[in-house]
Every structure is written in structure tokens, then in C-alpha cells.
């Protein structure tokens, strides 16, 4: 890839390289973001085969199979290499054309592939058989010297897993369990979920402790929520007390004018008596 980028001006090559690095870093974790970086690289250097290939894988990871196939074909024309043949066939499957993928599995290009790519092509062909409703044929397609070998290669776990899954599709459950176990044994990098499939066949259910803690926390929160309204009793009592107190206060307010009236009458009487006393003195 570095050699291919050397055909570009230095600054442009650096910009393209940064975007390709981001595609590689994000492809598994965030395919959509990886796709966006691949589009930037493609706009900058669409005549570089490595850029077209990276754009193809980013589109493939996001399910844009037609776009991915176009990019892979462009990269193949530029390099003349057949290493992308299996993934191109899988794009045909993704586009709903399993018969084309199966036809590609019989092309001379397959004989030019390395061992790993040939195994990948066999996986694609078996998948195409399943897509076409040919479950028994899928089982036969996967039966190969690579499957029977006891040596563990990077592709061994995936091949054994695919074979176990194909056996399960045709009702050969006991054999499927055996091959899921073999897939798990070879799966050093955790590329398959063979352990989950084994547990499913054995009727074992796993409980997520984190989910349990979350459920307990939700239950506790709901309980606290139920208790809070009870605390509203006191304010209600206070309101009722205030409500009871208001009439009394009104009564006191009503009593005050009456008292004032009595005082006024007393003063009036006193005033009336005073002249009489003055008269008497006169």
C-alpha cells in the first residue's frame, strides 16, 4: 500500500494514508464511520488500487454489496490479482444472486487462490447452496481435506463452525454438537460464537450478572418512588391544620370589630355623663 501511495504527491499521500488507517481501525468496531473515511480516501485517490480495495471492504461491512462489488472489480482490474475473488462472490450472495456466487466457485480463478482463500471460497459456495435451499449440498460442499485436518489454521474455526451449522440445518444434531466443540477448540481469537451454540444445544441458559444488577437497581428505584408519596401526608396534615385555623382566625377577626364597638359605646356613654356632671356643678 505504501508503494502504491508513493505515486501520489507527498502531502496527498499522507492525507490518503491517514484515512486508510482510520478505515482499518474502525472497520470492525464502527463500520459506518470506516465507510465515511473510505469515501474521503476515494475522493482523494480513486486511481490507487489499495484505496479502491479499502473502499470495497468498508462498503461490504455496511451491507452495500453492489457498491462493494464495483470497488473490488476496479481493484482487480488495476492489480490483476484474484485474491478478492471469494469476497466478490459473497457480494453476489448479498445482492440475492447465489447462483452467480456458485458459478464463481467453479471458475479457474479459484485454482489460483492460496489455501486460505480457497477455504473462504468453499464457505461462500456452501452459503450459496443454503441460500438456494440446498441444505444437504451445503454439507457436502464443506467436506474437504481442510475440514478433516487436525492442524489449526486461522480459518479452521470458521470452517468447522460452518460445517456444524450446516449439519444442524439437516437435523444431524449430535454431529453438529461435535463440530461446534471442535470449532470452539480451534477458536483462539473468539471469531465464532461456538460456545453459545453448544450451550444452546445442551439447554444451558446464561444469566447476565450486569443485567441482574440493573434490574435490582430499577426495583429499588421503583420502591423509593412508591415511598415518596407517603411523605406527602405531612403536608396534607399541615394544609388541613391551616384550613382549620383559617376559620378561627376569621372568627377572631370578626370578634375584634365587636370589641371595638363596645369600647366606642363605652366612650360615648362616658362622654354623655360628663356634661351632666358639669351641669350639676353649675
Image (tube, rainbow, N blue to C red):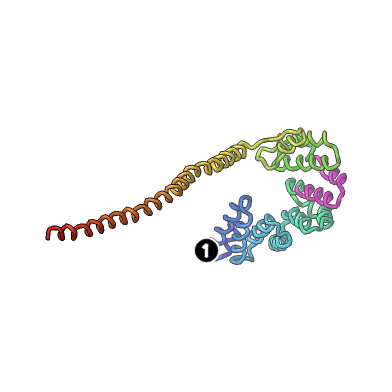
Residue 182 seen in the figure: no
- Which residue does the image show at 64% across and 66% down from the upper left? 47
Q: Position of residue 132 (x, y in %)?
A: 85, 52
Q: Is residue 105 left or right of residue 227?
A: right
Q: Is residue 114 left or right of residue 14?
A: right
- Which residue does the image show at 74% across and 46% down from the upper left? 115
Residue 59 seen in the figure: yes
- Position of residue 172 relative to residue 75, above or below, is above
Say what secondary structure mark 1 lies in.
helix
What is the quadrant of the N terminus in the image? bottom right
Q: Position of residue 38 (x, y in %)?
A: 61, 60
- Position of residue 77 relative to residue 212, above or below, is below
Task: Report which quarter residue 66 is drawn in.
Answer: bottom right
Dominant secondary structure (helix, strand or loop) of the stretch shown in magenta? helix
Task: Report which quarter residue 169 is drawn in.
Answer: top right
- Count of labels in the image: 1
Q: Position of residue 119 (x, y in %)?
A: 76, 46
Region of the chain picked out in magenta, as a range: 120-145
Q: Position of residue 260 (x, y in %)?
A: 30, 55
Q: Is residue 281 left or right of residue 95?
A: left
Q: Is residue 139 magenta?
A: yes
Residue nearest the viewer, comparing 193 with 23: 193
Q: Residues within 10 Å of mark 1 (few under 14, many from 20)?
A: few
What is the quadrant of the C terminus in the image? bottom left
Residue underneath mark 1: 10
Task: Report which quarter residue 157 is drawn in.
Answer: top right
Residue nearest the viewer, comparing 125 with 172: 172
Residue nearest the viewer, comparing 165 with 251: 251
Amino acid at each position: 500500500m505504501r508503494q502504491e501511495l508513493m505515486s501520489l504527491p507527498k502531502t496527498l499521500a499522507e492525507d490518503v494514508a491517514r484515512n486508510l488507517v482510520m478505515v482499518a481501525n474502525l472497520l470492525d468496531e464502527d463500520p459506518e464511520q470506516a465507510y465515511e473515511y473510505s469515501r474521503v480516501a476515494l475522493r482523494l485517490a480513486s486511481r490507487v488500487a489499495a484505496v479502491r480495495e479499502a473502499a470495497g471492504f468498508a462498503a461490504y461491512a455496511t451491507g452495500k454489496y453492489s457498491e462493494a462489488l464495483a470497488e473490488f472489480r476496479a481493484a482487480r482490474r488495476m492489480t490483476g490479482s484474484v485474491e478478492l475473488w471469494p469476497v466478490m462472490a459473497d457480494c453476489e450472495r448479498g445482492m440475492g444472486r447465489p447462483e452467480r456466487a456458485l458459478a464463481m466457485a467453479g471458475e479457474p480463478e479459484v485454482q489460483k487462490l492460496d489455501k486460505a482463500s480457497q477455504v473462504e471460497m468453499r464457505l461462500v459456495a456452501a452459503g450459496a447452496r443454503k441460500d438456494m435451499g440446498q441444505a444437504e449440498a451445503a454439507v457436502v460442499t464443506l467436506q474437504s481435506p481442510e475440514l478433516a485436518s487436525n492442524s489449526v489454521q486461522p480459518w479452521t474455526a470458521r470452517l468447522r463452525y460452518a460445517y456444524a451449522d450446516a449439519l444442524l440445518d439437516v437435523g444431524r444434531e449430535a454431529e453438529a454438537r461435535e463440530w461446534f466443540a471442535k470449532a470452539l477448540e480451534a477458536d483462539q481469537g473468539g471469531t465464532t460464537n461456538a460456545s453459545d451454540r453448544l450451550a444452546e444445544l445442551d439447554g444451558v441458559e446464561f444469566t447476565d450478572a450486569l443485567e441482574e444488577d440493573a434490574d435490582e437497581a430499577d426495583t429499588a428505584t421503583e420502591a423509593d418512588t412508591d415511598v415518596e408519596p407517603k411523605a406527602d401526608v405531612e403536608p396534607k396534615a399541615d394544609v388541613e391544620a391551616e384550613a382549620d385555623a383559617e376559620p378561627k382566625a376569621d372568627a377572631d377577626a370578626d370578634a375584634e370589630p365587636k370589641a371595638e364597638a363596645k369600647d366606642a359605646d363605652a366612650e360615648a356613654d362616658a362622654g354623655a355623663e360628663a356634661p351632666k356632671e358639669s351641669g350639676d356643678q353649675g
